[in-house]
Amino acid sequence: MRLINLAFLIPAILSVSSVKAETYQSFSTIGYFENEYGDNLTNSDSILLATQYYFDKRMSLGPFNEFNYINTISSVSVSYAKSNYETNFPSKYQITNSKTKTDNFTIGGEWFVGDFLVGAGYSYNHWESENCVLLCDNDLDTYRMTLGYLISDNLLVKVNTVVAADYDTRYTFDVNYNLQLNQLDYVGFGYNSNEDFDYHHLSARYFMALSSESFLTLGGSYLINNVKIETGSGSIDFDDVWGANIGYYFNQATSISANYGNDDSYGLSANHFFNKNYSLGINYHTIRTGEDSNSISATFMAQF
């Protein structure tokens, strides 16, 4: 019986050991995004430029864009996003056919000092609106601070603080745990909440090598939402939200994925590496609750 079991295990062991891993330290992205809400009620488009540099090499898990569930390498990042919004229905802030332009600049980093994690970030957001009533031209500075501790190589806890001008300071908590099944396969678990613990976000991700060339990912999340917004006429409650996704890698370079959520949303995406350094990803997502919302994006990435 042991010999039979070993016979079944040998192909899996050989497939994992024959996977060729690549190493990267820098990741740069150019992205374009479009969204349409309702029957031409709101249209938006955005351009994103972003780059992140790690102070040590990150090793891929086979696919060029898959890495360890918990990152333990210090990094710095910077990004710039420019967006245009056109709204064709009135609100208390604007009138019909309002146009808004926004610019967002973000810089940040996370540093591991032994088992301790220290993070900091700054974001500047500026927007200008035409045909609006309130908040037509404004700036917002936001500061982020993070303190974390790596309890083990597979368990990381973090406390995040967000401070924005004229807004209350917000605190959130993150816990991430990695269950390593073998050299490549893992199941990752995540938890997130705020200082009031009035919501609980749970997530899980399973990565599996099917062979030396093909890979599978399964993911899911559930948001227990007890947040209430008080209004003059009572309070607004929010429903719980769940979602699931699946991804398949034909090889290290080419993958497809799909996701579905209980808010009647679904998405499809595809990603292809032309070589081990350059890739192009296409994504489509729609929400069919109330007014339909449809978005599409294209992302080009260079990683070295």
Image (tube, rainbow, N blue to C red):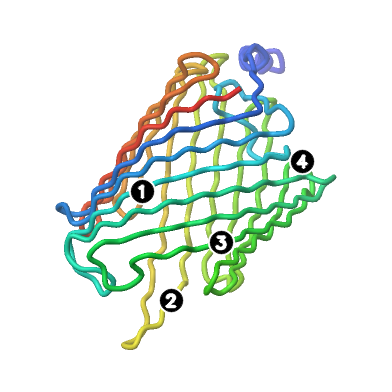
How would you rate the neighbour count of disc 1 (Cα within 10 Å): few for under 14, some for 14-19, many for 20 or more?
some
In front: 116, or 100? Answer: 100
In front: 302, or 204? Answer: 302
Asked which quadrant contains residue 231, the reply is bottom left
In three-dimensional space, the C-alpha distance between marks 3 and 2, rounded to whole angstroms, equals 24 Å
Name the amino acid, label 2: Lys
Asked which quadrant contains residue 154, the reply is top right
Secondary structure found at label 2: strand
In three-dimensional space, the C-alpha distance between marks 1 and 3, rounded to whole angstroms, equals 18 Å
Q: For mark 1, what is the residue? A: 83
Q: For mark 3, what is the residue? A: 142
Q: Nearer the viewer, mark 3 or mark 2?
A: 3
Q: Quadrant of the N terminus?
A: top right
In three-dimensional space, the C-alpha distance between marks 4 and 2, rounded to whole angstroms, equals 37 Å
| First reached walking from the N terminus: tag 2 or tag 1 | 1
Name the amino acid, label 1: Ser
Q: Quadrant of the C terminus?
A: top right
Q: For mark 2, what is the residue? A: 228
In three-dimensional space, the C-alpha distance between marks 2 and 1, rounded to whole angstroms, equals 30 Å
In three-dimensional space, the C-alpha distance between marks 4 and 1, rounded to whole angstroms, equals 39 Å
Q: Is residue 183 left or right of residue 101?
A: right
| First reached walking from the N terminus: tag 4 or tag 1 | 1
Q: Nearer the viewer, mark 2 or mark 1?
A: 1
Secondary structure found at label 4: loop
Q: For mark 4, what is the residue? A: 153
